Image (cartoon, helix red, strand yellow):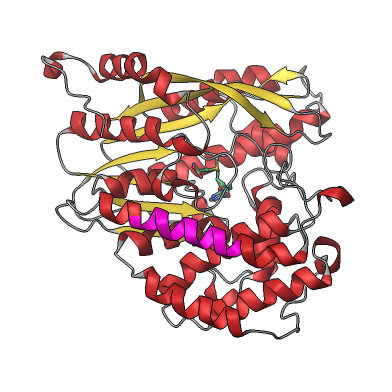
Amino acid sequence: MHNIAEPMIDQMTLAQRLGDLQQQRADNWAVTGSHSRPNLHSILRYPAMMVPSMQGDIIELLVDHVATPCRIVDTFVGSGTILTESLLRGLDFTGCDINPLAVLVCEAKIVIDAGANLDLAATVLLSALSSDVGSSVDVGFAGLAKWFTPATSQELSRIRRSILQVEDQGARKVFWTVFAETIRLCSNSRTSTYKLHARRDDSLVASNHVQPIFRENLANTLARAGHYQRLIQGRNAQPSAKVHCADVRSVGFANDDGKHTIVVTSPPYGDNQTTIPYGQFSYLALCWIPEDDLPLELGGFISNTHALDSASLGGSLRGAVDRADRIRGVSPSLDALLDRPEGHPIVKDLRKVASFMADFFDAMCHIRDHLPGRAHWAFTTGNRRAAGRPIPFDSICREMLCYLGARPVTSLRRTLPNKRMPSKNNMGEMITTENTVVVEFA
Ligand SMILES: C[S@@+](CC[C@H](N)C(=O)[O-])C[C@H]1O[C@@H](n2cnc3c(N)ncnc32)[C@H](O)[C@@H]1O
């Protein structure tokens, strides 16, 4: 792991130390591609994953700076970049995400961290798969025939039945993750976009490629799990890890072990529909994985492709303007963005921004209420454009946290080579930098 200790470190402020870290590590943080996501980091290609080395460096420095036992909380955990970086360092972890697929991936990572023997379970799976010549299709959902050919559905059903032969529930979570990645690669939806969007006929995946793709993904995941388990061999104690599948505004994050809390997260940058449709991205996999093996009863989440995105922050426009007006004075940057002559409505395209910001502030209030006392928070944010204007989410985020009593420490900047945020009209808006806002609650 990167050695961030320097002589005379005690006399440096946290802001100085983070600034030095940025200078020393900027080149490393800018690296992208598969080798920047080692071990468990890319067992599923979830959208908007954070850069592991950068977040790991920040966690390590904050823990070192606090100099008392710490635990890490990620309130928008996604596929668990922070989870992995925390567990690698032996740190207790609590996470939350509304998306059952994201939480399933996190649970798979926790199972691997706890030492699961996947090789034996994989043998059971592969032997069941080799002998399955059944031709039934075991799922039915809106859009099945559009997103999968009958032959592909038969192949996926064979894999699904074979995974169900594995009795070890933990190993099954890992295999469902491999299955989800296979669905992403083999459905008739493009892999170049997170929205469901039909592929051109010449790029459809032939059904006889489905099993080889699954087998290759499985072998890759087993190798990554083995690598990870070797990495944690020297760890002193087994850290605790729990990930809630729920709306962040309903989760209690409090701990009673007296450990210092460091919140490290990357929230959504706006409502899912106009930024990243995490729900739509997950829809097909959630329809294929048996509900009993998912971390949440899906309820209405798969009733249509938008349901999960509508339930996420900023997903509903109901009362958006009133809700945004009620938080006037919290963030000067947000006030300036939504400013309009007395009695005038908010510009139509900014209503979604207003709704998101009101929900986001609710979430911040909830998290702070449940994590009172001294704490450090590091929020990685991106500034997009909406309604033709820049949305200074980093400043809004910092100002909201300061309103809740935080002291700003610093903001770390990372340049992104090519991160696209799809907008409603499919005109990609480039996000070119990411800012990690670090604050301290006394
Ligand atoms: C930027 S992504 C996190 C990605 C993660 N850092 C990673 O490396 O994979 C933001 C996450 O916020 C989640 N989210 C959106 N609204 C939420 C809510 N109300 N409660 C909990 N999670 C929510 C989304 O499902 C998404 O996974």
Q: Residue drawn at (12%, 19%), measured in percent from left and top?
A: 10
The residue positioned 74% from the left and 76% from the top of the image is 154
For residue 288, which quarter of the picture? bottom right
Task: Describe residue 8's horizontal placement relative to residue 333 as left or right.
Answer: left
Count the numbered circles shown.
0
Where residue 108 sits, quadrant-wise, is: bottom left
- Pick the residue in front: 197 or 71: 197
Q: Which residues are magenta?
A: 214-226
Q: Main secondary structure of the magenta part?
A: helix
Q: Visible in this render: residue 186?
A: yes
x 11%, y 14%: residue: 8
Is 210 in front, or is 324? 210
Residue 266 position, x and y percent, is 49, 37
Q: Quadrant of the N terminus?
A: top left
Q: Of residues 246 and 154, which is closer to you in this image? A: 154
- 160 w.r.t. 300: above or below: below
Membership of 88 in magenta stretch: no
In the foreground, 170 or 91? 170
> Is 11 on the left or on the right of 437, as rendered?
left
Residue drawn at 66 percent across, 78 percent down = 158
Q: Position of residue 122 (x, y in %)?
A: 45, 73
Instruction: Classify residue 317 by image quadrant.
Output: top right
Task: Estimate the x, y position of residue 311 in percent, counting from the top left.
Answer: 66, 54
Q: Quadrant of the C terminus?
A: top left
Q: Position of residue 283 (x, y in %)?
A: 69, 59
In reply to whether residue 222 is colored magenta, the answer given is yes
